[in-house]
Amino acid sequence: MFEFITDEEERGQVGIGTLIVFIAMVLVAAIAAGVLINTAGFLQSKSQETGQQSSKQVSDRVQEVATVGNVNSAGDSVNFVNVTVTQAAGAGEIDLQNTTVTWIGPSGTYQLIAASDFNNTPAATGETFTYDVIKDSDDSAPVLNDNDDRLQYIFDVSDFTGGEELSEGEEVTIKVNTRAGATTEIRFTVPESLGNKEAVEL
Protein backbone atom coordinates (compact mmCIF):
# COMPACT_ATOMS: atom_id res chain seq x y z
CA MET A 1 0.00 0.00 0.00
CA PHE A 2 1.05 3.53 -0.64
CA GLU A 3 1.63 5.90 2.25
CA PHE A 4 0.57 9.43 1.62
CA ILE A 5 2.29 12.36 3.34
CA THR A 6 0.04 15.21 4.12
CA ASP A 7 1.05 18.87 3.69
CA GLU A 8 1.17 19.31 7.44
CA GLU A 9 3.58 16.37 7.88
CA GLU A 10 5.78 17.68 5.07
CA ARG A 11 5.89 21.13 6.60
CA GLY A 12 6.78 19.56 9.96
CA GLN A 13 9.70 17.64 8.47
CA VAL A 14 10.96 20.77 6.71
CA GLY A 15 10.66 22.71 9.96
CA ILE A 16 12.63 20.08 11.89
CA GLY A 17 15.33 20.07 9.20
CA THR A 18 15.58 23.84 9.32
CA LEU A 19 15.84 23.75 13.10
CA ILE A 20 18.66 21.18 12.94
CA VAL A 21 20.55 23.31 10.42
CA PHE A 22 20.00 26.42 12.58
CA ILE A 23 21.28 24.67 15.72
CA ALA A 24 24.32 23.41 13.81
CA MET A 25 25.06 26.95 12.58
CA VAL A 26 24.76 28.31 16.12
CA LEU A 27 27.15 25.65 17.43
CA VAL A 28 29.68 26.36 14.67
CA ALA A 29 29.43 30.10 15.34
CA ALA A 30 29.89 29.55 19.08
CA ILE A 31 32.97 27.39 18.53
CA ALA A 32 34.41 29.92 16.08
CA ALA A 33 33.75 32.76 18.52
CA GLY A 34 35.48 30.82 21.30
CA VAL A 35 38.53 30.23 19.11
CA LEU A 36 38.65 33.90 18.13
CA ILE A 37 38.37 35.06 21.74
CA ASN A 38 41.13 32.69 22.86
CA THR A 39 43.34 33.76 19.96
CA ALA A 40 42.72 37.44 20.68
CA GLY A 41 43.58 36.93 24.35
CA PHE A 42 46.76 35.06 23.47
CA LEU A 43 47.84 37.72 20.97
CA GLN A 44 47.14 40.49 23.48
CA SER A 45 49.18 38.72 26.13
CA LYS A 46 52.08 38.18 23.72
CA SER A 47 51.97 41.78 22.53
CA GLN A 48 52.08 43.05 26.12
CA GLU A 49 55.00 40.76 26.90
CA THR A 50 56.83 41.87 23.76
CA GLY A 51 56.13 45.50 24.59
CA GLN A 52 57.50 45.09 28.10
CA GLN A 53 60.64 43.37 26.80
CA SER A 54 61.15 46.10 24.18
CA SER A 55 60.68 48.77 26.83
CA LYS A 56 63.24 47.12 29.11
CA GLN A 57 65.74 46.89 26.25
CA VAL A 58 65.50 50.65 25.90
CA SER A 59 65.13 51.83 29.51
CA ASP A 60 66.84 49.23 31.76
CA ARG A 61 70.35 50.55 31.31
CA VAL A 62 73.02 52.20 33.41
CA GLN A 63 73.98 55.84 33.13
CA GLU A 64 77.54 57.11 33.46
CA VAL A 65 78.10 59.55 36.32
CA ALA A 66 81.89 59.89 36.20
CA THR A 67 84.91 58.14 34.69
CA VAL A 68 88.30 58.50 36.35
CA GLY A 69 91.68 57.04 35.46
CA ASN A 70 94.39 56.17 37.98
CA VAL A 71 97.86 57.20 36.82
CA ASN A 72 100.69 54.71 37.44
CA SER A 73 103.71 55.51 39.61
CA ALA A 74 105.82 56.39 36.58
CA GLY A 75 103.27 59.03 35.59
CA ASP A 76 103.11 57.97 31.95
CA SER A 77 99.99 55.76 31.66
CA VAL A 78 96.62 54.89 33.19
CA ASN A 79 96.52 51.50 34.91
CA PHE A 80 93.01 51.54 36.43
CA VAL A 81 89.76 52.99 35.09
CA ASN A 82 86.86 53.57 37.49
CA VAL A 83 83.41 54.19 36.00
CA THR A 84 80.68 55.32 38.42
CA VAL A 85 77.15 54.53 37.23
CA THR A 86 73.54 54.90 38.32
CA GLN A 87 70.14 53.94 36.92
CA ALA A 88 69.11 55.63 33.70
CA ALA A 89 65.83 57.53 33.80
CA GLY A 90 62.89 55.10 33.86
CA ALA A 91 65.06 52.04 34.42
CA GLY A 92 64.08 49.13 36.63
CA GLU A 93 66.42 47.19 38.90
CA ILE A 94 69.83 46.52 37.36
CA ASP A 95 72.21 43.92 38.77
CA LEU A 96 75.80 44.91 37.98
CA GLN A 97 76.88 41.35 38.64
CA ASN A 98 74.78 40.22 35.67
CA THR A 99 75.99 42.88 33.25
CA THR A 100 78.55 42.17 30.57
CA VAL A 101 81.09 44.73 29.41
CA THR A 102 82.81 45.08 26.07
CA TRP A 103 86.10 46.98 26.31
CA ILE A 104 87.31 48.31 22.95
CA GLY A 105 90.77 49.83 23.27
CA PRO A 106 94.07 50.27 21.43
CA SER A 107 95.24 46.78 22.38
CA GLY A 108 92.06 44.98 21.26
CA THR A 109 88.47 44.10 22.17
CA TYR A 110 87.67 42.21 25.37
CA GLN A 111 84.45 40.72 26.77
CA LEU A 112 84.48 41.24 30.52
CA ILE A 113 82.37 39.68 33.27
CA ALA A 114 82.19 40.28 37.02
CA ALA A 115 85.21 38.78 38.79
CA SER A 116 83.16 37.75 41.83
CA ASP A 117 79.94 38.50 43.64
CA PHE A 118 79.61 40.34 46.93
CA ASN A 119 80.15 37.04 48.74
CA ASN A 120 83.52 36.76 46.97
CA THR A 121 82.37 33.76 44.97
CA PRO A 122 84.67 33.57 41.92
CA ALA A 123 83.14 34.05 38.48
CA ALA A 124 83.72 31.87 35.47
CA THR A 125 87.17 32.01 33.91
CA GLY A 126 87.88 34.84 31.50
CA GLU A 127 88.64 38.56 31.46
CA THR A 128 86.93 40.31 34.35
CA PHE A 129 86.02 43.58 36.02
CA THR A 130 85.33 44.27 39.70
CA TYR A 131 82.93 46.74 41.29
CA ASP A 132 82.53 48.75 44.45
CA VAL A 133 79.78 50.63 46.31
CA ILE A 134 79.85 54.42 46.25
CA LYS A 135 76.34 55.10 47.58
CA ASP A 136 73.67 52.55 48.51
CA SER A 137 71.20 53.58 51.22
CA ASP A 138 69.30 50.28 51.38
CA ASP A 139 72.23 47.83 51.03
CA SER A 140 70.89 46.46 47.75
CA ALA A 141 74.32 46.31 46.07
CA PRO A 142 75.24 45.05 43.54
CA VAL A 143 71.70 45.94 42.40
CA LEU A 144 70.87 49.49 41.32
CA ASN A 145 67.28 50.03 42.48
CA ASP A 146 67.18 53.74 43.25
CA ASN A 147 68.19 56.88 41.36
CA ASP A 148 70.45 57.82 44.26
CA ASP A 149 72.42 54.56 44.08
CA ARG A 150 75.99 54.87 42.85
CA LEU A 151 78.07 51.80 42.05
CA GLN A 152 81.47 51.72 40.41
CA TYR A 153 82.97 49.50 37.73
CA ILE A 154 86.70 48.98 38.32
CA PHE A 155 88.85 47.98 35.33
CA ASP A 156 92.40 46.79 35.95
CA VAL A 157 93.58 47.53 32.42
CA SER A 158 96.79 45.51 32.43
CA ASP A 159 94.95 42.49 33.88
CA PHE A 160 92.98 41.77 30.71
CA THR A 161 95.23 43.38 28.10
CA GLY A 162 98.24 41.22 28.84
CA GLY A 163 100.16 43.89 30.74
CA GLU A 164 99.45 46.90 28.53
CA GLU A 165 98.20 50.13 30.09
CA LEU A 166 96.55 53.19 28.52
CA SER A 167 99.03 55.71 27.18
CA GLU A 168 98.50 59.43 26.69
CA GLY A 169 96.03 60.26 23.92
CA GLU A 170 94.64 56.73 23.53
CA GLU A 171 90.90 56.23 23.08
CA VAL A 172 88.60 53.61 24.64
CA THR A 173 84.95 52.65 24.17
CA ILE A 174 83.16 50.72 26.92
CA LYS A 175 79.80 49.08 26.18
CA VAL A 176 77.78 47.98 29.22
CA ASN A 177 75.04 45.48 28.40
CA THR A 178 72.41 44.74 31.07
CA ARG A 179 70.51 41.49 31.47
CA ALA A 180 67.45 43.08 29.79
CA GLY A 181 69.54 43.72 26.67
CA ALA A 182 69.94 47.49 27.04
CA THR A 183 73.35 48.93 26.15
CA THR A 184 75.16 52.00 27.44
CA GLU A 185 78.19 53.26 25.49
CA ILE A 186 80.92 55.17 27.30
CA ARG A 187 83.78 56.77 25.36
CA PHE A 188 86.84 58.56 26.67
CA THR A 189 90.32 59.68 25.66
CA VAL A 190 93.33 59.67 27.95
CA PRO A 191 94.67 63.25 28.36
CA GLU A 192 97.74 64.19 26.35
CA SER A 193 99.66 64.97 29.54
CA LEU A 194 99.64 62.78 32.67
CA GLY A 195 102.74 64.12 34.40
CA ASN A 196 102.56 64.86 38.14
CA LYS A 197 98.99 63.57 38.44
CA GLU A 198 97.68 60.70 40.49
CA ALA A 199 94.31 60.55 38.73
CA VAL A 200 92.66 62.15 35.71
CA GLU A 201 89.07 62.65 34.66
CA LEU A 202 88.33 60.72 31.47
Image: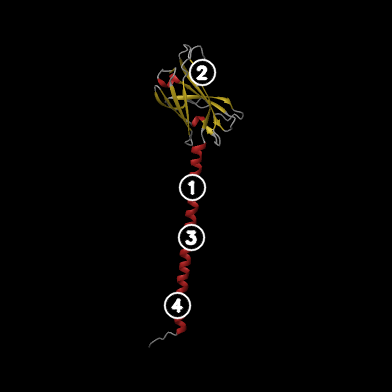
In 3D space, how far apart are the residues under numbered discs 3 and 1 (Cα atoms)?
Answer: 21 Å
Mark 2 and mark 4 lie on one chain; the one further toward the N terminus is 4
Residue at the outermost left position: 1
Q: Position of residue 32 (x, y in %)?
A: 46, 60
Residue at the outermost front position: 192
* Discs 3, 2 touching: Cβ within 8 Å: no
In 3D space, how far apart are the residues under numbered discs 2 and 4 (Cα atoms)?
Answer: 96 Å
Camera-nearest label, 1 or 2: 2
- Which residue is found at the position 58% from the left and 29% from the top? 149
Amino acid, disc 2: Val
Residue position for label 1: 47
Q: Residues within 10 Å of mark 2 (few under 14, many from 20)?
A: some
Amino acid, disc 4: Val
Q: Residues within 10 Å of mark 4 (few under 14, many from 20)?
A: few
Q: Secondary structure at mark 1?
A: helix
Residue position for label 3: 33
Residue position for label 4: 14
Camera-nearest label, 4 or 1: 1
